[in-house]
Image (cartoon, grey):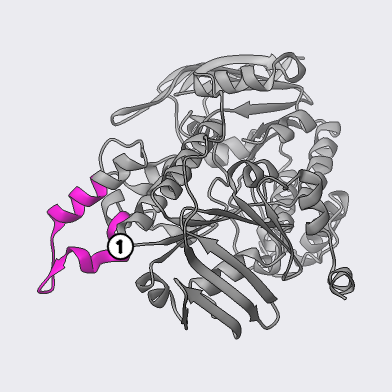
Amino acid sequence: MAEFALELKGITKTFPGVKALDHVHFKLKRGEIHALMGENGAGKSTFIKIITGVHAQDEGEIYLDGVKVDLKDPNHAKKMGIAAIYQHVTCYPDLSVTENIFMGHEKLQKGTRRILWKQMHNQARKLLEELGADFDPKTQMGALSVAQQQIVEIAKALSADAKIIIMDEPTAALTMRESEELYKITEKLRDRGASIIFISHRFEDMYRLAGNVTVFRDGKYIGTWGVHDISNEELIVAMVGREVTQLFPDRKHEIGGELLRLEGLGKTGFFADVSFTLHKGEILGLTGLVGAGRSEVCQSIFGISPYDQGKVYVEGKEMNIRKPLDAIELGIGYLPEDRQKQGLILQWDIVSNVTLSALKKFASKGWISRAKERQTAKQLTEKVNVKANSVFDLVSSLSGGNQQKVVVAKLLTSDLKIIILDEPTKGVDVGAKSAIYEIISELAAQGYGIILVSSEMPEVMGMSDTIVVMREGRVTGCLDRKEATQEAILEASMLNKSALETSAV
């Protein structure tokens, strides 16, 4: 029996103008969880597509259980026992869990080819129970949480008898508790004999699960190490190609006058009595456990989901913000948490995305000046250091970190004073994080007021001048940068409503 379930030798893949993979190597042992890490744009996505049969390599060889194979297409890869589970779950939201699990390999009665629904439901229920899920297989897929949808994707892989499972950033959208449940499921898959490639930007994922880690950089194989044989600093150097001596930039900004003030802001059923003040040049961190109401508050400030209680003041004047256009005209910009669905039009080029929210600036007598659009997009993408061949590249062709920078450039097209950033570094690598932090710090130094929504404790503590903590739709703490500690933030984030009311008496 071969030592490796999967082995890639000298894999090269070139697209027009880009060498996505350059003679990379990878070895996956039987029953192993192997971490694959690298910056956005390192070649991980192309690597997945080669293994799953979406793309054919230009050079190199693939071996399954020691036997050389040519993966003709995704169906062939599935038949060979290869499955992939992605960060953004690819499902049919209007169909049932059972239908999603067996899509493409339905149980059919011989002769009549009638679908055997009862058999499929029973098998789906058994798979879900094995994975510790407690929802019915007849449930509509769109009604499930992201964590539950990922469990369905794993069940789908098991239903197809997958031996090699690729998990691409599966914890990026999960809470700590959901991530821990996914860890247990992943370990259970390994114990059943599956070989798993776990792709993640989070070091905690790697340490919690993997035995070995392989690093790609700029489409090249950098090396493979035992997880406990390489330090964080060495791993970052391998990923980025340089030493990131300081993740969070030095404080360059002075705090000035009041820009935004919330007094008793509320939206029935979502949050209540939220009050805080944002000043010119200040970075205000808004944090708390998932479900605390942080994003809902920001969406109300921006007019996406208008508040029904309290008051909003912009530069000392009370304003009535009912729609995003009201907010934009007041100089408020918003970077949403889901950049791909809410922040960008992926099939448009960079120019069209950057200028979309401020087309009036480029129009005269009903005609849009494309030259002016192009010039502005070029200036702003250079300002935030977007890596692309040209401003006419499709946004879908960019790495996650560069997509995020395009959204920031889009914000800067408008005349803003206040910028709301909802999880701005979610799903990006350590190099892109460092670059985004530098951009945020520069914006604060220019006098913008920044509201930084984040679930990451180091990010909140490393970037914020003031930290506002929420729990169950209420503010439970407001901490100055100097007094903020991890313990104080956690304590505030875990206060419940009754404790908050008692402490106020």
Q: Is residue 19 left or right of residue 123?
A: left
Element under disc 1: helix
Which sits in the foreground, 238 or 193?
238
Q: Is residue 504 left or right of residue 417?
A: right
Q: Quadrant of the C terminus?
A: bottom right
Q: Position of residue 467 (x, y in %)?
A: 66, 54
Residue 167, quarter of the rendered image: top right
Residue 405 position (above or below residue 411):
above
Q: Position of residue 247 (x, y in %)?
A: 57, 32
Q: Position of residue 12 (x, y in %)?
A: 43, 20
Residue 348, quarter of the rendered image: bottom left
Residue 474 position (above or below residue 200):
below
Q: Which residue is mark 1?
A: 356
Which sits in the foreground, 226 or 492?
492
Please name the amino acid that badge 1 sits on: Leu
Q: Which segment did they paint magenta?
A: 354-378
Residue drawn at point x = 65 percent, y = 79 percent? 266
Residue 359 magenta-drawn? yes
Which sits in the foreground, 364 or 140?
364
Residue drawn at point x = 84 percent, y = 49 percent? 131
Q: Position of residue 411 (x, y in %)?
A: 38, 57
Q: Quadrant of the N terminus?
A: top right
> Is residue 283 in view?
yes
